[in-house]
Amino acid sequence: MLVLVLASGVALAGRFQHPGIGLNREQLDQLKKNVQSGVEPWKSLYEDLTKHDHRFSKKPRIFARRSEGITKIDSPDFDSRCAWDSQTAYCQAVMYEITGEADYRERALDYVRWFYTNITSGHRHWDSQFRWPHAEGWYLRAAELLRYTGPKTGPLAWTKDDTEGVNRFIAIGEGFWWGRGTLLNQLQFTLGGPLARAIWRDDWNLYCEMVEILTANKDGPVGQSNGSIREMCRLVTTNEVTGAKVKPHVQYAEMGRDIGHPFPGAGQLGENLTILWSQKTRVDPVTGEVSNRRDAVDPIEFLGHRYLRGVNQICKYNLGFDIDWTPIAINREKGEFWMRPSNWGGGRGRISNEVDILYMYYRWKKNLDLGKSEETRYIGYGLDMKGVDYWHALLWMPNEAAGKATLERLDPGKDWTNRFAEFLQPRADGLSVLKDKMSGARYVSSTAKSFFFPMFLSFRKPLPKAGEYVLRYRCDGLSGMAVINPAEYETEFADPETCKKRLYVEKVKLPPTGKEWKEYSFTLSNPPDRNLIKLEFRTKGKRLDLEWLTVPH
């Protein structure tokens, strides 16, 4: 169990900081200071984003105004375009704060004003229960920043008409929100709008209600229609099918649905937390309600770091490791359960930097060695390798990262070498990690006649169609290796015959080497299309040792 202590400094009940939807005045001033003083990593982040991210450039793209005559909130396409343009307006407003250049603020004002001037009506539509609140949240982030910064007079000033226009605009979609029972990851997408609206309107009661829904959602349903930290990062103590007690462990519940949706939901939770951070909100460690008591915690640490433990499990599964999973109920009334993690759609093997806000908090703000604990090492390795999203990092990289964090991503070793010892789980039958007496290298040694081994290839680009793989091994009898694509192998709803045909990408013979290590080169005519593969090894000898696998790049 992780035990961390945070410094105090919380919002007083009923009083909001303005600006305060994602970035407050203190954060903006610190960001400006870091960039203008050339402090790393903000200096490099700023330089990269202004060159390569249109939202931070002087020629940002426009999405909502591509079609003439748009007057309604009436489609998921409009919701998405509004969200994209609002993110751009937010980034442009931040750029004005950093540089003081008027054209950034002019563009941000233009984006915000276009929506409240042209959009006059709307109605519920497909997925509007979460797509519109998500867009609303970003729109209000931009409007809040413009409202409480900049000059008081002149063409760059925020006006009373602007405030009234924004109020009219957000009132159109206010009834789209479904409430506490929104499905799984969608709940976190729904909260961006109401949280931002509460701050915009100085509605303390609404704010406290939304914070509790984010953390515990005690009055929401139990199961799939509850995307709070408590329910999504669920503490499992019982097999809900058999009733048998199990060793307590955290499961990220939505992994039972598929492996494609957990990362977006967990990532959106991180973005919502930035709103709470800008208000310096703390919560009761058990109930999740807004609290100023001495034992109150940062919302990210709610229920003993439940969010961290849940996301760590997502990363562990996607890196190819086995995970503890116990059947859980998604709808007790209907007797519906998730029996195992589902790789429906073949998405296993994806590591996403959508969860980088969580990663940055523990890696830099808390200065936690993520590799030391089973509850953190997989998000640590996954995000060290994947890297953070640069725009998230520029805005929300903790100040404790100054002079420490770099933009370099972790490569899997020299020449893209993946070491087997890093992927072995302690409970693997017949397999153990040993150390070579001559080289000091760690390797996996097996006495099993056959075994499977997961391997996350760690490449950030698709494997080339042609290229040389090199396996370092030794064995005392004829052995073989089969490369398996788990995207087919573990897709429970795929056609069995199709899976059987596409299961093995390639089979490779491994000649005996005696006591000597050998580097065996081979090519794959049909390389796997996922980061994650499974290797099946067979041997006629008494022992097979594996040190590393190099992949082409």
Image: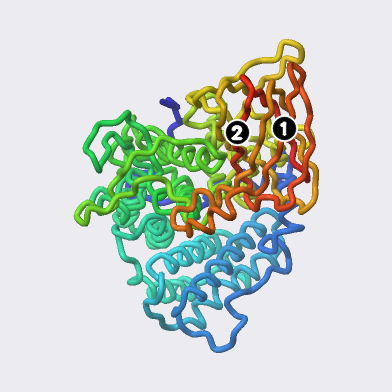
Q: Up-down: is 208 above or below 452?
A: below
Within-10-Å neighbours for mark 1: few <14, some 14–19, many 20+: many
Residue reaching furthest bottom? 69
Q: Which residue is mark 2?
A: 400
Question: Percent x, y for residue 279?
Answer: 44, 47
Question: Percent x, y for residue 272?
Answer: 45, 52
> Which residue is found at the position 51% from the left and 81% from the top?
117
Element carrying mark 1:
strand
Which of the 4 image quadrants contains residue 293? top left
Which amino acid is tagged 2? Answer: Glu
Mark found first going from the N terminus, 2 or 1: 2
Within-10-Å neighbours for mark 2: few <14, some 14–19, many 20+: some
> Which residue is found at the position 73% from the left and 66% from the top?
58
Question: Percent x, y for residue 387?
Answer: 65, 43
Q: Up-down: is 384 above or below 31?
A: above
Which of the 4 image quadrants contains residue 448? top right
Element carrying mark 2:
helix
Q: Which residue is mark 1?
A: 510
Question: In this orientation, does residue 18 appear?
Answer: no
Observer-nearest residue: 74 or 533? Answer: 533
> Which residue is found at the position 73% from the left and 25% from the top?
512
Left or right: residue 492 versus residue 241 is right
Which amino acid is tagged 1? Answer: Leu
> Which residue is found at the position 62% from the left and 81% from the top?
66
Mark 2–mark 1 CB contact (< 8 Å): no
Question: Percent x, y for residue 394?
Answer: 64, 48
Question: Which label lies toward us, 2 or 1?
Answer: 1
Observer-nearest residue: 92 or 343? Answer: 343
Q: Up-down: is 152 above or below 115?
A: above
- CA gap, disc 2 and disc 1: 50 Å
